[in-house]
Image: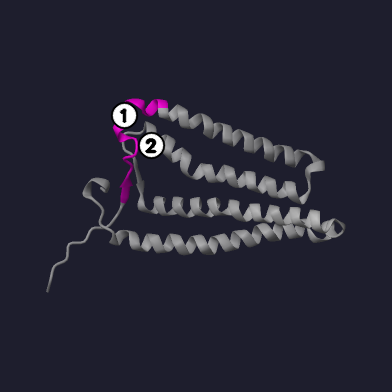
Amino acid sequence: MERVNEASVREFVFLSFSSLAGLQRLLFVVFLLPYLFTLGTNAVIISTIVLDRALHTPMYFLLAILSCSEICYTFVIVPKMLLDLLAQKKTISFLGCAIQMFTFLFLGCSHSFLLAAMGYDRYVAICNPVCYTVLMGHGMCVGLVAAACVRLYCCTDYHTSGISSALPLIQPAPSLLL
């Protein structure tokens, strides 16, 4: 019987800024400021749409969903990156990486579907303004967002599970894994 040497991936070590050890605090600030600006501007957009009754229309509903998606999208990657800029040990577990990848792909692709829904809203408003309120009611907007989420979940789950199942078979250089 032949003996096989197998290794499994438990965590990944980030090496991206390891050569810039002296600049990591500066990089932390450089990345933190745009992140806070992104969070703040999207929060203002959402708050304005929620608080102003004149903006309770399908286009602004979709814009609020897009802003919420943007907040979640940046929240998936940037906090971990900021933490790793200040941490001594820069690792992520295999499960954490898979969850982060799934969420990043899901929210990243959702922008395309939400922009398509916004385009459909404008198409109906321009080409059929008489029937706009009937065709683009609140139910249609919620349906478009729900359909996008279901489609994105299926697509993202397929890709993430495929990559996750193949990843332990890949044997990268020993310096990249613990």
- For residue 84, which numbered disc appears in the image? 2
Please state the extent of the stretch shown in magenta in the rendering: 11-26
Tell me residue 16's x, y (percent). Answer: 34, 39
Circle 1: element type? helix
Residue marked by disc 1: 21
Label 2: how many Cα within 10 Å (few below 14, some 14–19, many 20+): some
Left or right: 166 in relation to 135: left
Assign the N terminus to one quadrant of the image.
bottom left
Calculate the distance from the C-alpha at mark 2 to the C-alpha at mark 1. Answer: 12 Å
23, 119: nearer the viewer: 119
Left or right: 129 in relation to 151: right
Check residue 18 for magenta coloring: yes
Q: Residue at x 32, y 48 (%)?
A: 12
The amino acid type of the residue labelled 1 equals Ala
Left or right: 137 in relation to 74: right
Check residue 165 for magenta coloring: no
Q: Quadrant of residue 17?
A: top left
The amino acid type of the residue labelled 2 equals Asp
Label 1: how many Cα within 10 Å (few below 14, some 14–19, many 20+): few
- For residue 112, which numbered disc appears in the image? none
Tell me residue 111's x, y (percent). Answer: 59, 51
Q: Residue at x 47, y 43 (%)?
A: 77
In this rendering, the label closer to the viewer, 2 or 1: 1
Q: Quadrant of residue 7?
A: bottom left
Tell me residue 90's x, y (percent). Answer: 33, 39
Left or right: 145 in relation to 164: right
Dot 2 or dot 1: first in sequence order is 1
